[in-house]
Image: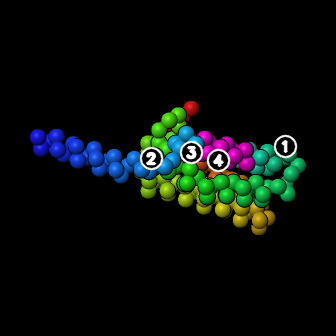
Amino acid sequence: MMLRNFLIGLSLAVLFTGTAQADDIDAEAYISYREDLMQSAKVHNKAISNIRKGKIAATDSLVRHARSLHELSMMFAEAFPEGSDFGETGAKEAVWNDPDGFKAALEQNQSATAALVKALQQDADAAAVGEAVKAVGKSCKGCHKKFRSKD
């Protein structure tokens, strides 16, 4: 009887604390939103790479692509609210089970993209820009390794 009452109480607590938030969001919309953000980041990363390799003569656009990449990095956190952890998502449970680790990974990406913008704005030499690009890639991979399921 005591276990039954405990389980009923626990169920009611979960119902009244978790349901309101889950009902307030559309998990599938958030999943789509974060996929769009990540696709945009991929496009800007590829543009930066192709410009730096000389495949595209758009060096004046490098800073704009880096700024866009940094702005996207500032939006990632809001794309993973509690309650958007179900459905067809590539996000691992660690996003919600390890919020401090996820926040740290996002902050590392934000710092790396900010450093890339700064290097490009200061007309840093190719080696310094290359290191900044590598740091961005490392921050992306580090987050994906721990917080994203492989396709």
Question: Which label sits in the foreground, 4 or 1?
Answer: 4
**Foreground residue among 127 and 104:** 104
Q: Is residue 11 visible?
A: yes
Give me the C-alpha separation between circle 2 and circle 3: 12 Å
Q: Secondary structure at mark 3?
A: helix
Q: Residue at x 15, y 42 (%)?
A: 3
State the residue position of label 2: 22
- Residue 37 pos. (x, y %): 64, 47
Give me the C-alpha separation between circle 4 and circle 3: 10 Å
Q: Which residues are magenta?
A: 31-44
User: Mark 2 or mark 1, which has the lower sequence index?
Assistant: 2
Determine the residue located farthest toward the right in the rendered image.
57
Mark 4: amino acid: Leu
Question: Which label sits in the foreground, 3 or 1?
Answer: 3
Mark 2: amino acid: Ala
**Foreground residue among 103 and 36:** 36
